[in-house]
Amino acid sequence: VYSRSHAPNGRMAEGVLAQLEGAAEAMVFPSGMAAVAAIFRTLPAGASVLVQSQIYWRTTAWIRSFCSRRDIALHEVEAADTDAFTAACATHKPAIAWIETWLRIVDISACAQAVHAHGGLLVADMTTSSPVLTRALSFGADIVMHSATKGLNGHSDVLAGALAVKDAGSDIWQAIRADRDMAGAVLGPFEAWLLLRGMRTLPLRMERMSQNAQKLAEYLSDHPAVEAVLYPGLPSHPGHDLACAQMTGGFGPLLSFVVKGGAPAALAAVGRLALFHRA
């Protein structure tokens, strides 16, 4: 069969990811943003969508532009505030609600119940935690998205994206598959092989990255030049208890912290880093 959507390497990578997520099926894409776009392209003009505020900026910027062009009603909400998210679902009745569980810890089950009550679907960007730490589908999400460029691959040599779904027979999943195949938004065989190689070490890498982030967060939380540390592994984080309930084996590799003294002091601290690039 024509290899655009049936290359064996891609199918193998999708099979492994589906098992990791406890999903019915998975699909790989040439980038995380291609996976994002595949979901939103299934929406008809005039639809309503709900998107978590202050998520990955490229996702927000693209969704805003796309919804504007397609006359789709976009509503942004602080999804970590479960009451605000629930109220937004009741008011706007979105076809799709989009959440991330990165530095803000979102109650996946509560969000799923809220959007399902009004006939919508919940999509969760789980790039940072990966299925090793959180299986969002088991908490009620309908579709999980990954920028596979990051944790899933883990070697900084692949640009890829992925989706995993609870119900492979759903209309939206069939529409995504048809759109991906016809538009050619498929992952090349060599990139799929590299992604498959990367996922073989995912559990070990995620465990060690979480341990390193926890140690760094604890160190920074006691540093006299640091005002605050944002990491769900710290008991002081507002989402700590929820993270303990949703995450298994660690709290992920991503953290941020606020330097005392404002922007000048923060930029000076970043400028002295030896292992991280100022981007």
Image (spheres, rainbow, N blue to C red):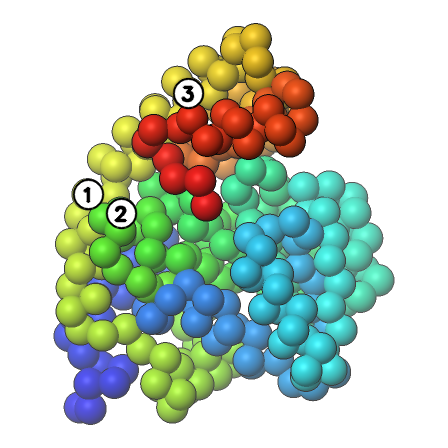
| Image position, residue 86 (x, y; %) | 76, 51
Task: Indicate which disc residue 201 carries.
Answer: 1
Residue position for label 3: 216
| Image position, residue 200 (x, y; %) | 17, 48
Q: Nearer the viewer, residue 33 or 223?
A: 223
Left/right placement of residue 104 relative to residue 186 reads right
- Which of pointers 2 and 1 lies earlier in the amino acid sequence? 2
- Which of pointers 3 and 1 lies earlier in the amino acid sequence? 1
Secondary structure, mark 2, is loop
- Which of pointers 3 and 2 lies earlier in the amino acid sequence? 2
Residue position for label 2: 154
The residue sitting at 55% across, 53% down in the picture is 56
Could you say which quadrant of the image residue 226 lies in? top right
The residue sitting at 58% across, 55% down in the picture is 57
The residue sitting at 31% across, 36% down in the picture is 206
Up-down: is 237 above or below 94? above
Secondary structure, mark 1, is loop
Up-down: is 273 above or below 162? above
Q: CA distance from mark 3 to mark 2?
A: 20 Å
Report the amino acid beneath label 1: Thr
Query: In what quadrant of the picture does the N terminus appear?
Result: bottom left
Q: CA distance from mark 2 to mark 1?
A: 8 Å
Crowdedness of circle 1 by 10 Å Cα count: few (<14), some, many (20+)? Answer: few
Is mark 2 in CB contact (under 8 Å) with mark 1?
Answer: yes
Report the amino acid beneath label 2: Gly
| Image position, residue 265 (x, y; %) | 59, 24
Crowdedness of circle 2 by 10 Å Cα count: few (<14), some, many (20+)? Answer: some
Up-down: is 71 above or below 30? below
Work out whether residue 135 can be spotted: no
